[in-house]
Image (cartoon, rainbow, N blue to C red):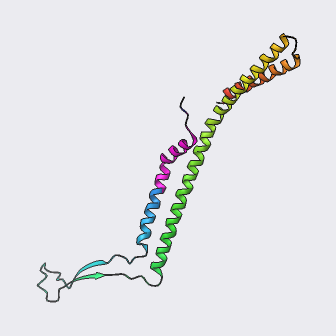
Amino acid sequence: ETRLALAEAVRLALENQPLLAEKSAAMESARHSAAAAGELPDPRLTLGLANVPSNGLSLTEEPMTTASIGIEQGIPGGDKRRLNAERARLETERSHAELEDGRRAVARDAALAWLGWYQPLQAKSLLHGLQREAQKQLESQRIALGVGKGNLQQALAAQGVLDLLHDREAELGHQG
């Protein structure tokens, strides 16, 4: 019988939880956004035509027709760039904290599920060991009675303990 160790169960749960992959992607996205948050906005290219004649398609027909090409660069005022960078950094920290919180929750849930599976196995194993010891004690009491050196009360007590252990085994069998 192959038994799954607690650490392996937790590792598998962490690797196969889609929610953690989603949170990890969100954290990575926030990290990339934070890098650009304090920078100047991208420059814009502007193209334009003015005074185009409305009665023809020729741009040379009207001497006032002008074409313009320009580049605009927005420069935010005040502390806007610094505040944007700070907000993005805090967003990255929040995403990281959510990811770690999710990992801890998955690890905790996996550990609790593992314990729910493992505890009855351990209880049965311990119970079988106790039954073997109680059986040996009962046999010892019977032998002592057979040679006239035993005590009937001790033999009955040993039988009672063995019966209680068998009852507990039956209860565990019904539970899991």
Does the segment drawn in magenta span residue 12? yes
Q: Is residue 36 left or right of residue 101?
A: left
82 or 56, nearer to the observer? 82
Q: Quadrant of the C terminus?
A: top right
- Vertical placement of residue 158 versus 91, above or below: above
Where residue 108 appears, as percent x and y from the top left, is: 60, 48
- Vertical placement of residue 3 versus 54, above or below: above
Residue at 77 percent of width and 16 percent of height: 139
- Vertical placement of residue 158 versus 75, above or below: above
Residue at 71 percent of width and 22 percent of height: 132
The quarter of the picture where residue 45 lies is bottom left
Residue at 83 percent of width and 14 percent of height: 144
Where residue 55 appears, as percent x and y from the top left, is: 15, 80
Prevalent SS, magenta region? helix
Where residue 72 appears, as percent x and y from the top left, is: 31, 82
- All told, the count of numbered labels is 0
Q: Quadrant of the N terminus?
A: top right
Where residue 68 appears, as percent x and y from the top left, is: 22, 83
Q: Which portion, as a residue range, is magenta?
A: 3-23
Query: In the displayed image of the protein, which residue is found farthest to the bottom?
Result: 64
68 or 128, nearer to the observer? 128
70 or 40, nearer to the observer? 40
Residue at 48 percent of width and 70 percent of height: 88
Does the segment drawn in magenta span residue 156? no
